[in-house]
Amino acid sequence: MTTITMAGALNAALRDALTEDEKVVVFGEDVGTLGGVFRVTDGLTRDFGDDRCFDTPLAESGIVGFAIGMAMSGYKPVVEMQFDAFAYPAFEQIVSHVAKLRNRTRGLLTAPMVIRIPFAGGIGGVEHHCDSSEAYYTHTPGLKVVSPSTVADAYSLMRDAIADPDPVIFLEPKRLYFSKDDIELGKTEPIGTAVVRRGGTDVTLLAYGPTVSVAMQSAEFAAEDGRSVEVIDLRSLNPFDDETVAASVRKTGRCIVIQEAQGFAGVAAEIASRVSERCFHHLHAPVLRVAGLDIPYPAPKLEHFHLPSADRVLDAMDRLQWNDAPDLSKAVTV
């Protein structure tokens, strides 16, 4: 067992991939000599050379465009966007070319690359440093989108993302970079698989990335009131694990989706729709969402009002129907 941070686990995953495959290259702003703002690439240039891990100009569109060319030439680029909103200048490259290359060429060319994006808030940062941009990428066919909430998943999902034949948007929760765990580095569940972090029978909380810890804390508090809460860590937003989610909601009959991003037209809205379509006749109450407020990311001293908290999740839990049993006579079972 090794005590390691999430940043350390990501670094280990990159190291192992660089060691095993000479076609893997890592680049971005300050990822070389500095080792990245969050130290995820610390020591990689020293140990693998500046042709395997190197700095780029401050031009995100150029970083991704360069990665597309390398991927088309047989390399496996892993690029860092430094901060979530810094990726927007590269958005056209990602949506118009990274996501569409396989379909556009009928499979003759692919874009096996990982775009690492430190995302979400909780670090006292300002706008452009705390965006939750997952909806843009999850909405785009051709992209896989993942976000780890544990140290073990950070390592495993990164190894899977680098090995994937198609592009993966890797959303790294900034507030979790220096969370620690005692683990053996290795593979957990593959991309596309959600996991049950806590079993329960009364209500299902669906969370991913930084909101999983909020869900776990909410479940602890709810247990003190006699409510049995199941927490599912989605891990992968696209592809989405409908089977695990539906099995849980059909058991509990209640569901709350938690996201840091603004609520309007967010990922939680899509998840709530999928749950409603698949589990309608099992539901005791409408699926609810706990999300960020529909405002630009607030100033650091105000972000605690914006971010989902256990109190807000418990308030939503109280709004669910707790008296009537659902009518299962017309339930969908497959």
Image (cartoon, grey):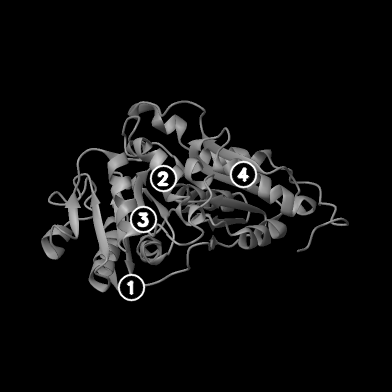
Q: Kindly report which numbered mark, 4 or 2, lies closer to the viewer in this rendering.
A: 2
Q: Position of residue 258 (x, y in %)?
A: 54, 44
Mark 4: amino acid: Glu
Q: Position of residue 322 (x, y in %)?
A: 74, 46
Relative to the observer, which residue lies in front, 155 or 226? 155
Q: Using the rendered image of the protein, determine whether residue 7 is visible from the camera's viewpoint.
A: yes
Disc 1 versus disc 4: distance between alpha carbons?
35 Å
Q: Secondary structure at mark 3?
A: strand
Mark 2: amino acid: Ile
Look at the picture and state if 22 lies above or below 209.
below
Within 10 angstroms of label 3, few (less than 14), some, or many (20 or more) residues?
Answer: many
Mark 1: amino acid: Glu
Disc 3 versus disc 2: distance between alpha carbons?
11 Å
4 and 3 marks in contact (CB < 8 Å): no
First reached walking from the N terminus: tag 2 or tag 1: 2
Name the residue located 38 percent from the left edge and 36 percent from the top edge: 88
Name the residue located 62 percent from the left edge and 53 percent from the top edge: 204
For residue 59, which quarter of the picture? top left
3 and 2 marks in contact (CB < 8 Å): no
Residue 184's disc is 1
The residue pinned by badge 4 equals: 270
Q: Quadrant of the N terminus?
A: bottom left
Disc 3 versus disc 1: distance between alpha carbons?
23 Å
Relative to the observer, which residue lies in front, 180 or 164? 164
Disc 4 versus disc 2: distance between alpha carbons?
22 Å
Within 10 angstroms of label 4, few (less than 14), some, or many (20 or more) residues?
Answer: few
The residue pinned by badge 3 equals: 114
